[in-house]
Image (cartoon, grey):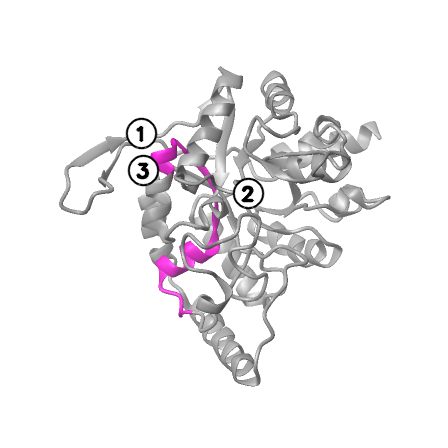
Amino acid sequence: MKNRKNEKNFSRREFLGTTAAAASVFFIPSLFGSEAKQKIVKPNSNFGGVKIGAITYSWRSMPGGVENIIKYCQESGISNIELMSNDLESFLGAPQNPMAGMMRPPAGQQQPGQPGQPGQQGQPGGQPGGQRPQRTPEQEAAIAKYNEELKKWRTSLPMSKVQQARKLFDDAGISVHIVKFSPARWSDEEIDYAFKVAKAMGAKGVTDEIGEEAVKRLAPFAEKHGMYAIFHNHMQFGTPGFSYDPFLAVSPAVMMNFDAGHFFGSTGIHPNEILQKYHDRIFSVHMKDKTGPKSTPPNTNMEWGKGETPIADVLLLIKKQKWPIHVDIELEYPVPEGSDAVKETKKCVEFMRKILA
């Protein structure tokens, strides 16, 4: 076991090298319109040596788009993100999904905890077990045509377009450490595209949902591009016998996006047990506050500070050990009346800042 641990340490430190950090001043228009006075914003969510960020899925109830994502980062004080690919691809000029209106409710009507995009080609990020509306034959034909158009667009996209997107984030002082494409079911050419785009954005890896097929599919591409294939868990740890071990054994390019909230909510076990054992193979943590499996209500997303997830313990362990693990807010509790997802994210940032100060 000791030799294996050393092998893991090598894979963590040697496989990719160091992460480049972007931190510059960005001028953005005020929320009150393009004619309003410009202001300077320098977000910094690195506290006590811990890189705090957010997955942009947290803002699924808000208007999308790269420019809005940057604005939300500025407003909530976020300088590190896991970027959902739908906003990026839209900016890059991807063809429009004919099912988008059916699959994603209008802004403000998204139910917390529900996926913003179904886990299918062209709409990455859907959560396992989500219910999809039954499609008509006409809709199936439209989706098939769209996927072909999307594949053609992806495989011909010049990386100069991606550099334009990266510059917006770099100029804003926002680092994209992961792009969530969820590409395991894509063609080889499109998976290559996903890793090329993520690398061009300055990210260290591409995320997908954990599963044997997905891990084996993406690991060789991660190796090819000198990046990580990073996998997110939901409630799998609540299944007896589930372990990271067989997935990590596939390749040193396989890393984990450990969802501490889902882990605690489904098991009641302290997340630090997983962090202590696998910290050198955990690239990032999704943080949320949930009740435990035996609580009333069980395994439920709560406003931060009202649940039972030991958030402080997790943060302080990462800080103490100086592990290079990103900690990303994943906002899934119901947004209180009179607030919005960006304001709630800002509360979460402040919650963690106080712990790490």
State the residue at coordinates (54%, 33%): 303
Please name whichever residue, 62 or 296, is drawn nearer the observer in this view of the structure: 296
Residues shaded magenta: 73-96
Give the image quarter of residue 274. top right
Residue 58: image location, x then y, percent: 49, 44
Q: Earlier in the sequence, mark 3 or mark 1?
A: 1
Q: Quadrant of residue 35?
A: top left
Label 2: which residue?
Answer: 332
| Alpha carbon distance from label 2 to label 3 | 26 Å
Question: Crowding near pointer 1: few (<14 within 10 Å), some, many (20+)?
Answer: some
Q: Which residue is mark 1?
A: 42
In the rendered structure, the answer to whether residue 223 lies left or right of residue 352 reads right
The residue type indicated by label 3 comes to Ala
Inspect the image, locate mark 1, and give the three-letter code of the amino acid beneath it.
Lys
State the residue position of label 3.
Answer: 172
Which mark is nearer the camera, 2 or 1? 2
Q: CA distance from mark 3 to mark 1?
A: 7 Å
Q: Is residue 43 above or below residue 144?
A: above
Label 2 to label 1: alpha-carbon separation: 26 Å
Could you tell me residue 163's position as x and y percent? 35, 51
Left or right: where 22 falls relative to 32: right
Of marks 2 and 3, which one's residue comes earlier in the chain?
A: 3
Marks 3/1 in contact by CB < 8 Å: the verdict is: no
Name the quarter where the N terminus is drawn: top right
Question: Residue 98: which numbered mark, if any?
Answer: none
Query: Which of 106/29 is in front?
Result: 106
Residue at position x 19%, y 46% from top? 33
Could you tell which of marks 2 and 1 lies nearer the N-terminus? 1
